[in-house]
Amino acid sequence: MRRKLLKTRVIVNPASNHGRTRHRWTEIKEILKSFFKEFKYDFTERPFQATELAREALREGTELLIGVGGDGTVNEIANGFFDNQKIINPEATLGIVPSGTGCDLTRSLNIPRNPKNAIKFISEAPDQPIDVGRVIYSDREGKTSSRYFLNIADFGLGGEVVRRVNEERLKRKASSYVRCLIETMLSFKGHEVRITVDGQEKASGNYLIGAIANGKIFGKGMKIAPQARLNDNLFDIILVKSLRFLEFCLHGWKLINGSHLSYHKVTMLRGQRVQVFPLKPEPVLIELDGEQVGCLPATFEIIPLSLQVKGFLNKP
């Protein structure tokens, strides 16, 4: 059944899911045609192109922008909804067809993983306004930069794992996230940082993981912030103190099912503005929605209910 005809644009990352999206595109396109009478589509060919394509489409009046790819692709498209720190069209909506290796954001939105079900979902699901995170950080050249994120930003372990995954890809090696996580855990001891929340110093010490969470899940299924909500105008800040490898092996499973908040080395805070400062000169990597972007120091700010997304937020 076709719904109201919206001006629709689809942005596809053919390299997502280790290139499988390119091979599945013909099938995905045919499914799209059965639910949307008219749409244009673009393939990305380089990093951050999805942001440019999204911005261009929204300026041309696109009402529904559909991303086909993983969390990184969706992050790039979400950044395209903004220009000069303002939303281009508050009425425009983001739809997601999961086609990546992680797709953690889609779990918080209850979007099906199967392409046909996901596309049907986009045609039927309500527009939900969600919070967006904005981070000001030091980029790879040491310059101050800023980006938006929808799901989770983190420093420490996550950034180190993504760095290792990217290095292995450059060497054309198989880059299993789980294997890279284990290898990183064997050598990574955490970082010394100081954290303020809404202008008050709240924590200082050596932390293995620091997650500034808008959504619940990161790291390909880890429920790092089980109480987080995409529409509550707050970040859940999850801090995990340095763990010995054996300790991580014994208790790391709690991160999978979300039962770690009661562990004595885990702290949860909430707030709208988070500042994180490194206490040593070593670089502390940060990642946004699964993509490594730069280093601390960084300031994370919530932008309440600023982006419309196709999804359901009230399911457990």
Image (cartoon, grey):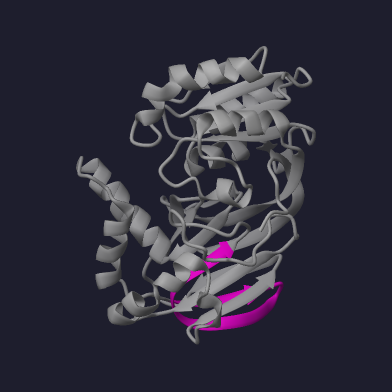
Looking at the image, the residue that sits furthest to the top is 38
Residue displayed at 57% across by 66% down: 225
Residue displayed at 64% across by 81% down: 201
Quadrant of the image occupied by residue 299: bottom right
Quadrant where the C terminus sits is: bottom right
Number of marks in picture: 0
Looking at the image, the residue that sits furthest to the front is 1
Q: Nearer the viewer, residue 15 or 26?
A: 26
Quadrant of the image occupied by residue 164: bottom left
Q: Is residue 102 left or right of residue 184?
A: right
Majority SS type along the magenta span: strand
Q: Position of residue 312 (x, y in %)?
A: 70, 46
Residue displayed at 67% across by 12% down: 37
Q: Nearer the viewer, residue 257 or 44?
A: 257
Please determine whether, in this image, residue 212 is positioned above or below residue 56: below
Q: Is residue 314 left or right of residue 222?
A: right
Q: Is residue 237 left or right of residue 24?
A: right
Q: Is residue 180 left or right of residue 284?
A: left
Q: Position of residue 199 (x, y in %)?
A: 70, 74
Q: Which residues are magenta?
A: 192-212
Quadrant of the image occupied by residue 195: bottom right
Q: Is residue 206 magenta?
A: yes
Please determine whether, in this image, residue 278 is positioned above or below residue 178: below
Quadrant where the N terminus sits is: top right
Residue displayed at 70% across by 69% down: 271
Q: Nearer the viewer, residue 254 or 71?
A: 254
Q: Position of residue 255 (x, y in %)?
A: 46, 69
Q: Position of residue 207 (x, y in %)?
A: 44, 77
Q: Is residue 247 magenta?
A: no
